[in-house]
Amino acid sequence: MSIPHLTFVGRRLLQAIPLLFAVVIFSFTILHLSQGDIADVMAGESGAASPAILRDIRHSFGLDQPAMTQLAELGSRVIRFNLGKSLRYDKPVTDVIFERTLPTLLLTTTSMFISLILGVACGAVAALNRGTIIDDAIFVISLITYATPMFWTGLLLIILFSARLDWLPTSGMTDAALETHGLSYVVDVLRHLLLPSVTLSTVHFAIYTRLMRASLLEVAGLDYVRTAQAKGLPRHRILIKHMLPTPLLPIVTMAGVQAGALLGGAVLVETVFAWPGLGRLTYEAVFQRDYPLLTGILILTSFLVVAVNIVIDIIYSVLDPRISIR
Amino acid sequence: MRGLFRRFCHKRSAVFGLALLLVVVLVAMLAPILYPVDAAEMIAPPLLWPGQSLSFPLGTDQLGRDIAAGLAEGARTALLIGIVSTGTAVSIGVVVGAFSGYYAGRFVESALMRVVELFQTMPQFILVLVVVALFSPSLVMTIIAIAAVSWPPVARLVRAEVMSLREREFVQAAVALGRRDSGIIFVEILPNCLAPIVATSSIMVASAILTEAGLSFLGFGDPNLVTWGSMIGEGRNDLRTAWYLVAEPGAALLLTVLSLGLVTEGLNDALNVRWLGHPLA
């Protein structure tokens, strides 16, 4: 990477800082407003709600401090990478979250690649066969995959492939009874990964298909493609060398836009398939009103979205030399 | 207007979508007449399969509630939440987009766009889930939360349109005549942005319905309402033995979202709106 590229990356990172602060402040505000009293929840659990105990709990979580002090405290803890203790797990929030981050990244990136590859391929096939029955068929498929609620798709897949055919496992990331190692461990995880990742990719597949088709058709009418045709280049060469690179840019942009949607969708898909990731953790934390953990999840998922978008910007600047990186 | 309708009807898939949507709307409106008994009422033997009893053509659930009545009430809830939250989101988005587009380059714009950026950074569904679950899982809170995360794309769209219209002669003429800014924005500029706003709104209703379904599937819907999502969530426990409990409300969701998608597609063609970033828009 050249010097201008490095300064571009550096500037992009600097630009993200105020946004990340805004995320922290906003997350704090929502949770602070909704909190009611965390001490009530905790004391209610232990069955001892005497005023002295309530005061102790409030004090130990810093809840007796004014809101601004609490926010400043949270800000300084975010910088120090310490988000306090989870109420339910009795472990540091960062530990709980990091345990769950890898499975979610595995699930979301797999889904993203499935939807990207299938979407780009189907979109290209549809555009090349414009107006034919193939185009119509791809249109109908993308329409239905978009309109089907993800959690429902997941349940139907479970009925078909697990309950009826008994081909694939219904839940979790590994088979606890098997205690596999090495290659058989990888195979076990992949078997568990297949249904959830396909489920999560459906909506995104539809988006990429439609985007690919629309941008290919736009390119097809442009002068440089018609010049290539006039020169008598073979069809596949025109397609690969001249037409395909252009739609890559909007596709890459769209992949960035979809980052947040993938994480949101993961909440539903992981709940359906009991996938031990961030999405399921979010559901559990909401259910148990684990405020420190929820603060951490809101902040971390937003940070992930920002990170993905920085990577996308970098890819973009490499792909498209017209983008000024200075 | 009539020309618009004729162009819309040119596309068979759009007409099919509109017909399907009308059926859903009709069922939602007639629900109280068709099923005068509360859909949450236990009125029959539990777990009747579809077709097993003539009076309950779609079967009954674990508690002996009529599924057909549940689907009809679910249609009401889905359309209500979809339409009201989209209406709210579009109003916010239009106002924010119009001001930030008209005052592009000034402080107002950069401040408003930072807010848009914040909302587009935080994963929408997680935000909605946290807000609804922690404040109160009620109809009103669901609508507020969905509206709160759905307006930014509208704001971006309107901002871009307003920025380009602002330079046009008819707007410059209004400026030269000394019209007030708000008059120029709402009377001169915004009516010209109507086409893309209409096309986006119809697909936003669809995604609001899907978001609500996800929430109530997870158990964070309004406990006093029967929704398609909550029916799927409850049916999930008997997935292996009585899969129709999950299949039927899901099919209702699918058909409703599909109809909205087809209508959006038809509107786009009829209004000549370019691709907006939604697969169906």
Image (cartoon, grey):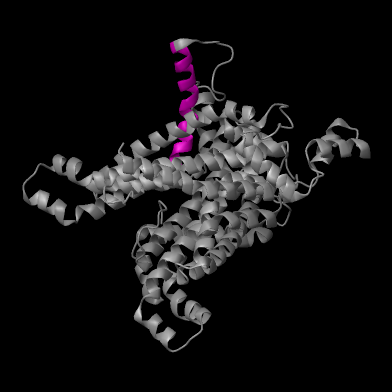
User: B202 left or right of A322?
Assistant: right
Relative height, residue A176 to residue A7 (above, below): above
- Above or below, B180 against B207 in this view is below
Q: Is residue B136 visible?
A: no
Name the residue at 44% across, 62% down: B157
Locate residue B50 relative to residue A5 in the image: left or right.
right
Q: Is residue A81 visible?
A: yes
Count of marks, rendered view:
0
Instruction: Please name the residue shown 51% across and 83% down the image.
Output: B180
Which quadrant holds the N terminus of chain A? top left
Q: Position of residue B49 (x, y in %)?
A: 62, 37
- Relative image position of residue B119 (x, y in whole percent): 55, 53
Q: State the image coordinates of residue A233 (x, y, percent, origin top left).
A: 8, 44
Return the residue found at the far left: A231
Is A127 colored magenta in this rendering? no
What secondary structure is the stretch in magenta mostly built from? Answer: helix
**Nearest to the observer: residue B222 or residue B98:** B98
Position of residue A169 measured from the top left corner of the image (x, y, whole percent): 52, 22
Query: Would you place residue B137 above or below residue A105 in this image?
Result: below
Between A156 and A81, the one lying in front of the other is A81
Magenta extent? A183-206
